Amino acid sequence: MMNVKTLGLLGTGVIGGGWAARAIHCGVNVIAADFDPAMEKWLQDSIDNSRQALSQLTEGIPLPPPGKLEFTTNPLEMAEKADFIQESVSEIEELKTKALLPVSEATRQEVVISSSTSGFLPTDLQKNLKHPERFIVGHPFNPVYLCPLVEILGGKLTSEAAKDIAREFYEDIGMQVLMVNKEVPAHIANRLQEAMWREILHMLNEGMATTRELDESIVYGPGLRWAVMGMNQLYMMAGGDGGARKFMEKFGPTLTMPWCNMDGPELTEDLLDKFEFGT
């Protein structure tokens, strides 16, 4: 498996800065490329500001000496030096593909190129790249240096080897890897957030609650539970000795009630099986 000594960042900003802070803290050198030279100071400040939180999070965990930061305004220089590339430019598909193409031509064939995109499909982003088989999506959550989740998904041309390299690298810098088996817009976690956000907007629009009340209902209620275990596991436990099936027998019919503005799915045997055996 490839040993990633230098992480290349294509684009800095909030997401790129989070990647830099996490990687450097875990002993990986970083070379960041951004056309704006003013981003060098911004990036260094971002890393400095995250240092205390990262130190507290990893207290008692043996780590190598911190990595070093290098900055360039030339993406091709970054591409030549990097062992793994993380793209984090603005969430505009045309801009991403335009930035990725020359980098894919300049870097070594074995170097995995990963996009931080929160919604675009890897198949669409990789189709014009050189060696598209080494392209993946590695979608993090902001702030990257605090939130460990990264969703990995490949496109139609992505190799299993590229996914394996990405998984090992992300785990080496303390990420919790979620392998997404099917390409869908917005991946997994953002789709769940989107569903809740839509209902929040409905409730706001209909005067049911204020933004503060809605946030408090999450932060002091289910949000605390979700931080410990997922909703599926919680509901399975709520079924008691009967488990997931018992819970669905009791509460499944409420999906037909007008409690929210999203239609509930039909409770087929296939869906019940996925709910019961997937937790």
Image (cartoon, rainbow, N blue to C red):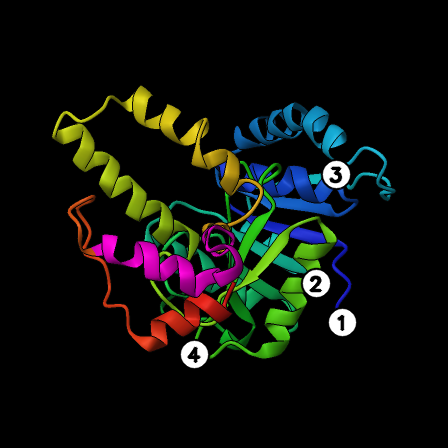
Horizontally, is 80 left or right of 260 in the view?
Answer: right
Going from the N terminus, do you reach mark 3 or mark 2 first?
A: 3
Residue at screen point 58% across, 42% down: 228
- Please tell me how crowded label 1 is: few (under 14), some (14-19), or many (20+) other residues with Cα within 10 Å: few
Instruction: Give the alpha-carbon distance from disc 3 to disc 2, as whole Å.
Output: 17 Å
Q: Mark 1 points at which residue?
A: 1
Against 236, residue 107 (above or below) is below
Nearest to the observer: residue 1 or residue 76: 1
Helix, strand or loop for disc 2: helix
Q: Mark 3 points at which residue?
A: 25
Q: Where is residue 157 in the image (x, y as percent from the top left)?
A: 47, 79
For the point 31% across and 43% down, which residue is it? 196
Query: Which region of the structure is painted magenta?
Result: 235-255
What residue sits 59% from the left and 31% below the top?
A: 43
Along the polypeptide, which appears first: circle 2 or circle 4? 4
Distance between the Cα atoms at labels 1 and 3?
A: 22 Å
User: Does residue 76 appear left or right of residue 210 in this picture?
Assistant: right
Q: Mark 2 — residue?
A: 168
* Amino acid found under the numbered disc labelled 2: Glu
